[in-house]
Amino acid sequence: MGFANDNIRGAVIMMASMAAFTLNDAIFKTVAGQLPLFQAIFLRGVIVTVGLLIVLIATRQIAPDLSKRDWKLIAARTLGDILATFSFLFALFNAPLADVTAILQAAPLVITLAGALILKEKVGWRRFSAIGVGLFGVLLIVRPGGEGFNPYLLFAVAALGCILLRDLPTRRLSRAVPSMFVAFVTSLAITASSGLAALTTDWQAVSLVAFAKLGGAAFFIFGAYTFGVMVMRVGDMGFVQPFRFTAIVWAILLGVVVFQDYPDALSLFGTAIVISMGIYTFARERKVAN
């Protein structure tokens, strides 16, 4: 009974994390047209980084004793996260929320493929097939060269590749590395790099409304980070991980309500393919592990 309760708690936390991430994305997208991208990333980053710093000081994790190997992995992960963040948010500023979010749902498939090709992890033909079908679903969403093609969605696809640079080193970090410390280092690096990039653009005056939006986005992304740390410690990951796909439900709802973006049938079909193949891959990994 206790294990079942842990799984349910883990599923709820995962759904809360996905809701927080998507609400952050939706609020942040509303700033498009009011502030330049890098200025918006920088200002949000300052708020998030300060919040994470306060948590680290309160929990006495601000200066963990880490090996050189872990520091190198954190550096590689941070570079991947910077590139993934910039690519994703550039797509988010210029393309429908639901489409951008749906493409990112292929990340587990791409990570599994990279684990097989780069880390030599054992992946059978069933999961390889699921990966292939899932990536076909991404093509249906992007539709390169087809009617309704939005070139900015290619930046969401690029973000998938950058996520590999982030997550492959993450999988090799030792258990001694505090998750919240990694989040802080990443947030600090993204804030600093976006601040430098923002120097190349004309800064805009920040209205009270825009500042409130950035504060709201920071609140939700901070919550997403916190839930993300919590979910790694509750329940069976094979059971909990598929609930990450609830992000697309939030993205579609928020896209319709906030931005009046109605995904067409082909995009919904591609999204369904990506999600179903992701769930199958998680289920298959769980079966193989047992």
Image (tube, helix red, strand yellow):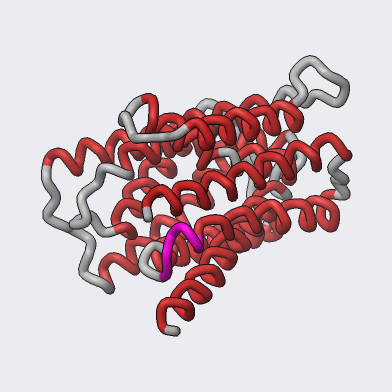
Residue furthest top as drawn: 145
**Is residue 227 in view?**
yes
Residue segment shown in magenta: 235-240
Along the line of sight, the residue nearer the viewer: 39 or 94? 94
Question: At x 49% / y 28%, what residue is drawn?
Answer: 161
Residue 205 position in % (x across, y down): 64, 46
Residue 214 appears in view: no
**Left or right of 278: which side holds 56?**
left
Between 218 and 196, the one nearer to me in the picture:
218
Q: Position of residue 28 (x, y in %)?
A: 65, 50
> What residue is drawn where x is 76% and y is 29%?
140
Instruction: Identify which residue, 39 or 140, lies in the foreground.
Output: 140
Task: Please give left or right for residue 202 compared with residue 95 in the image.
Answer: left
The residue shown at (71%, 58%) is 250
Number of labelled discs? 0
Secondary structure mainly formed by the magenta segment? helix
Give residue 29's position: percent from left, percent from top: 69, 47
170 drawn magenta: no
Quadrant of the drawing holding the C terminus: bottom left
The quadrant in which residue 212 appears is: bottom right
Classify 104 as above or below 60.
above
Percent x, y for residue 126?
Answer: 53, 36
